[in-house]
Amino acid sequence: MTISLQAAFAAASPRITPRRMPFISLMIYLAVLALWALLFGRAFFLNSIWAWSAGMVYIAYDTVLMLYVVWQTLPLAVSARGPSAAVAGQSRPSVGILIAAHNEALNLPEALAAIARQSDAPDLILIADDGSRDATDTLLRDRYGLAIPAVGQSSIGQFGRSRLQWLRLPHQGKARALNTAILKADTDIVITLDADTFLADDAIAEMRAAFAADPALVAAGGILVPVCDDSASGRVMQWFQTYEYIRNIISRFAWMRGNSLLLISGAFAGFRREALVAVGGFDPECLVEDYELTHRMHRYAVDHGLDWQLRMIGTSLARTEAPSHVMTFLRQRRRWFAGFLQTQYWNRDMTGNARYGRLGLRMLPIKALDTLQPIYGLTAFVLLLALLVTGKTAIAVPVFGLITAKIVADFLVYLWTVHLYQRLTGGRTRTSFAAAVFAAILEPFSFQLLRHAGAAWGWIAFLRGNNDWGFAPVTSPSREAPNAGE
């Protein structure tokens, strides 16, 4: 770049100028809320199956969305490819791995061991030590031969074919640590990697190949495989989360086809570094900095007339630690959903806005519906229990008929997503069609309710403006979204 990266980064601050919500966006969000209130109220005045209208709408919406994902991903069953060839010559972009680590001395050796096994080694491994107070300093000094740098400084050594850099920072949070690391890195591509995420042996080669093949590609998500501990609860949670991750990944491929991909998990993601600098890096005020970043990249591309592409790379895999216990899972989903609501609020002007193409007219209105989908789901479950308790079997029987039909539809979609997932990943992940059957049957009455409960908790945290997480209440004027025309 021709200007100072530090100056460019500062000029591209993620702060947004206050503007009011456009009328069409306001109407979409109000309609979602009003529909829920209407359907909930009907339960107290009707005696037929229509008393369960909230559940019927919830099932219909979820089913239509699943079928849309299947329809959008049908071409991928034909175009799915195997691993890429190695990239060489002038087309070979340099790659750096950025790991923001806070008290990760137990996980760093395994993460670095996975990097050492790469068929295409990264040019740089940069560990942004975010004020760790465990044995991280001893580990990096004694095991990897790095000198202990002063706070705010870095030391450099060699790790196989890669440079290993230890950037020692005061504790400031993951987003700020990554932003500092982005400025320190000197590679064309930077890959953000959580310390508890472990790369498959060709993950870097696949990422490098994807960016080398397409100059318009600015952000790419890898495939994450959840791994829990070996306890009884861990095995159950891993089973459910595996199929949840598969469905979510396939849905990202579906939305990717219309350049409407909104989530690239920062646990394993590749970015063109100049694009990250241009948009101001990660926002430290957001609970889900990776989700917020993709919105800002889409906005920046439209505002500047750029053909930026955000994609998923099906052949680039990694294992990541996932919650093994119910309370850990609920706390994770509380943060994720509060961050989702936070990001939707900040970018509410894009919802229903034709300026943003399919993203504004299709994807973001669906996300507006998703803000209340967990509330619809929990309402449907509570109303069903009420029907059973009050002995209204005339209503309960057809309701269970609908639920059975939904389970069958879920199972068929599970089969498709598992099949496509295996094709996209080259068959390198262990998934079972038989296990998918049981997941489809059990999930609506167990794991799905758990997800909704975590999301409802996220609603409470968002409305309270939980300052313990470092973000302001929704009334904060500093976070108003800009007018789409500016």
Image (cartoon, grey):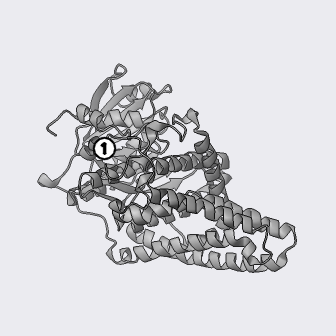
Residue 434 as seen in the image, left or right of residue 40: left
Of residues 18 and 16, the one nearer the viewer is: 18
Residue holding disc 1: 279
Residue 432 as seen in the image, left or right of residue 223: right
Above or below, 166 against 330 in this view is above
Above or below, 6 against 93 in this view is above
Above or below, 266 against 354 in this view is above
User: Secondary structure under badge 1?
Assistant: helix
Give the image location of residue 457, x and y in percent. 64, 48
* Residue that sits furthest to the left in the current view: 90
Residue 314 as seen in the image, left or right of residue 288: left
* Residue that sits furthest to the front in the current view: 23
Task: Using a 10 Å C-alpha cutoff, classify the residue at mark 1 as few (fewer than 14 neighbours), some (14 to 19) or many (20 or more).
Answer: many
Q: Residue at x 47, y 27 (%)?
A: 132
Above or below, 186 against 242 in this view is above
Of residues 305 and 414, the one nearer the viewer is: 305
Q: Quadrant of residue 396?
A: bottom right
Let me know if residue 72 appears in the view.
yes
Of residues 307 and 257, the one nearer the viewer is: 307
Give the image location of residue 287, x and y in percent. 50, 42
Give the image location of residue 57, x and y in percent. 63, 71
Give the image location of residue 266, x and y in percent. 41, 47
* Residue that sits furthest to the top in the current view: 150
Could you tell me the amino acid type at mark 1?
Val
Let me know if residue 96 appears in the view.
no
Total numbered labels? 1
Which quarter of the figure is the N terminus placed in?
top left
Q: Residue at x 36, y 63 (%)?
A: 354
